Amino acid sequence: MTAIGIRLWAVVLFVIAPALFAVPVRADAIETLEIVTADGTHSVQVEIAKDDLARERGLMYRRFMPPEHGMLFEFEHEGRQSFWMRNTYIPLDMIFISKTGVVTNIVAKAEPLSERIIPSGPPCAAVLELNGGAAAAMGMQVGDRVRHPFFRP
């Protein structure tokens, strides 16, 4: 195989193939979530990642996420979670949330494409990923509340 052929296969494997297998967002997969901060109540449209496959893929390979959108990772049991930004091209805020909907930790503007482990800190039942800087723009703080049917206040 020529050098050009090898480069072409590399483009197919690392650029085109991930885009072809990206999970499309279905309109019925979007739910509304509310974040209550000292600045007021903020509505966010979220995709739900509630099984292993969806949680593993998360927001990988995406180059853009609209404002006021995000992904909510739901876990069956509250515990310590860890994330990374492998194959994630956009900076994200990670908001760790207890089973009662209380924000337990916020990691702002996680570095795109990093394989550094990002721990939840205290145990959590869910993680909300938003565009980097969104948490600060909402005035979000540890102790704020998140309202969504997943949480049991």
Image (cartoon, rainbow, N blue to C red):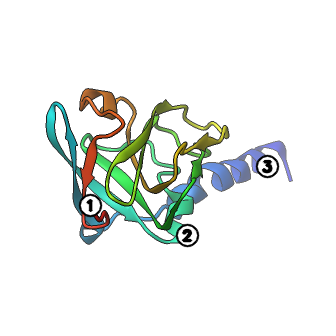
Identify which residue, 37 or 84, lies in the foreground. 37
Kindly report the distance in space between the C-alpha atoms of the residues bearing marks 1 and 3: 56 Å
Disc 1 designates what residue? 153
Q: Say above or below: 74 vs 64.
A: below
Name the secondary structure under disc 3: helix
Identify which residue, 10 or 123, lies in the foreground. 123
Asked if residue 94 can be seen in this view, the reply is no
Number of other residues with Cα within 10 Å of mark 3, as a class: few under 14, some 14 to 19, many 20 or more: few
Disc 3 designates what residue? 6
Residue 13, image x and y in percent?
67, 55
| Numbered badge on residue 52 | 2
Q: Say above or below: 25 vs 89.
A: below
Query: Do the numbered discs 3 and 2 sit on residues whose CB atoms are within 8 Å?
Result: no
Identify which residue, 106 or 7, lies in the foreground. 106
Name the secondary structure under disc 1: loop
Kindly report the distance in space between the C-alpha atoms of the residues bearing marks 2 and 1: 25 Å
**Disc nearer the start of the sequence (1/3):** 3
Q: In the image, what residue type sits under mark 3? A: Ile
How many numbered marks does the figure carry? 3
